[in-house]
Image: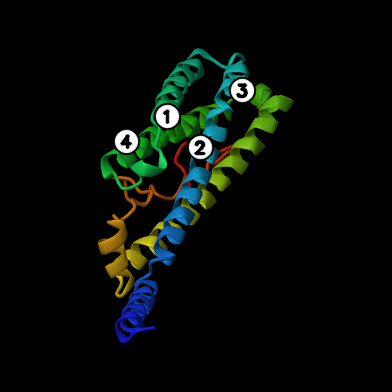
Amino acid sequence: MTFTAIRRAGIVALAAAGLSGCGINSIPTKEEAAKARWADVEATFQERANLVPNLAEVAKGAAEQERGILTDVIEARAKATSVQINANDLTDETKMAEYQAAQNQLGAGLGRLLANFEAYPDLKSITNYQMLQGQLEGIENKVRISIRDYNAAVQDYNTEIRTFPSAIGANVIYGSEPLVPYKSVTPGAEVAPTLDMTPNGSATAAR
């Protein structure tokens, strides 16, 4: 092997080592991890939306006011399920804000409806309603956890692409852009609400 060939091989080896040190492998790994966590967020919100038809059945035994709130909830559900975010949209703050607003509206409507239901002892004694309460409590907890995990993965990825030496690989090779965490214009709304379903619970979400 000639000296020139040896030198070229050495340059290639150094370049490969340098790129490895610039986060060439960790950047896509962390990005895919964040996207996977986002899929979990979407799945939990869809699970919550799927319970709205069951609420409609329960609301048949409620007063007109509750049926009016239910109409708002059904409309909010339609909006929430129509706003979709794919993995490529996670860098778009406008699309994320639209998705978050739709989900917040649905969550608020569910909170109001369930709080009003507490005024009806006959409704609360229905087995289906009791089951629905438990399911919604469980889903709200899953929403909180999935959002927390997504935001943690986003923070990890965003830190990676902004920190030297990984920032070199992020800019030169991938053209990486920061991902948008789940947040809201309302302070603290990035934490999913815990629905207060106690007999004297209010419609205000506990955080």
Circle 1 sits on which residue?
80
Which residue shows up at 52% across the image and 49% down it?
146
Q: Identity of the amino acid at label 4?
A: Glu
C-alpha distance separating marks 1 and 2: 9 Å
Q: Quadrant of the N terminus?
A: bottom left
- Which residue, as the protein is rendered here, is positioned at the far right? 127
For residue 140, side relative to residue 109 (left or right): right
Query: Cβ–Cβ below 8 Å for labels 3 and 4?
Result: no
Cα separation, mark 4 vs mark 2, equals: 14 Å
Q: Residues within 10 Å of mark 4 (few under 14, many from 20)?
A: some
Residue at the spot of label 4:
98
Asked whether disc 4 touches disc 1, contact meaning CB atoms under 8 Å apart, the reply is no
Residue 152 place in picture, x, y as percent: 44, 60
Amino acid residing under circle 2: Phe
Q: Looking at the rendered structure, which numbered label has been put on residue 54?
A: 3
Q: What SS does tag 4 mark?
A: helix
Mark 2 closeness class: few <14, some 14–19, many ≥20 residues within 10 Å = many
Q: Give the CA distance from mark 2 to mark 3.
A: 16 Å
- Looking at the rendered structure, the kind of residue marked 3 is Asn
Say whether disc 3 or disc 4 marks the residue closer to the N-terminus: 3
Secondary structure of residue under mark 2 = helix
